[in-house]
Amino acid sequence: MKQAKRNNPLSRLAARLQLTLEDRSQAQLLPDAKLIRRCCQAALQADVKQAQVSILLVGSEEGRSLNHTYRGKDYATNVLSFALNEGENIADLPLFGDLVLCTEVVEKEAAEQGIELMAHYAHLLVHGMLHLQGFDHEDDEEAQIMETLETVILAKLGYPDPYLEEKR
C-alpha cells in the first residue's frame, strides 16, 4: 500500500520564490545557491504569495556605475534593490525585483567589521529582499522596524545580530 505524500512546507516555499543568479564578479568566495535561496525565502513576508527575484553579483566598477545611474551616488555600494512593482499592493501582485550585490564592497565591509563573510552576505540578501517588499530605513522609525525584522530573520537562519555593535 502506498503512503500518501505529505504536504511539504519547504516545497510550497520553493514554489513561492523563483530565483535567478548571475555572477559577473571576479570574487573567489561567494555564497552558494543554497545559502542565497535560504536567505531570500526567509525574508519573504507572509503576504507575498509569489516572487521572482534576480540576483546579480558584480565587481566594484559595475557596482559604482549602477549606483551612479540609479541613485546618483558615484561609489560602489554593498547592495542595490530594484522592485519592479514598487508602490503596488504586494498582496495582489507577485513580487518582481532585482538585487545587485557588489562582491568587493561586501568583502571589504566584512573584513573591516571583523564579521564572517557569509554572515554579511546573508544580512545583505535579507536586507535587499526586505527593500523589494517595501521596507526602508529613511527615518529612525522605519529603520528600527527594518533592523528588527532583519535581526529576527537572521537569527532564524543561525546568524548573529548585524546591528549588535551599534546597540552597545
Image (tube, helix red, strand yellow):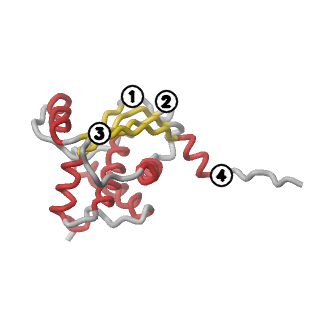
Q: On the rendered image, what quadrant is the N terminus found in?
A: bottom right
Distance from the alpha carbon under mark 2 to that under mark 3: 22 Å
Question: Circle 2 is placed at which residue position?
Answer: 93
Q: Amino acid at mark 4?
A: Asn
Q: Is residue 159 left or right of residue 28?
A: right
Q: Which mark is residue 100?
A: 3
- Disc 1 and disc 3 in contact, CB within 8 angstroms: no
Q: Which mark is residue 114?
A: none
Q: Residue placed farthest to the left in the image?
A: 74
Residue 105 as seen in the image, left or right of residue 39: left
Label 1 crowd (10 A; few <14 / some 14-19 / many >=20): some
Residue highlighted by disc 4: 8
Q: Pinpoint residue 106: horizontal percent, then vertical percent.
A: 23, 52
Between the residue at mark 4 and the residue at mark 2, the CA separation in whole angstroms equals 24 Å
Kind of residue sitting beneath label 1:
Asn
Which secondary structure, mark 3? Answer: strand
Q: Is residue 125 left or right of residue 2?
A: left
Q: Which residue is mark 1?
A: 85
- In the image, what residue occupies the spot 41% across and 58% down? 153
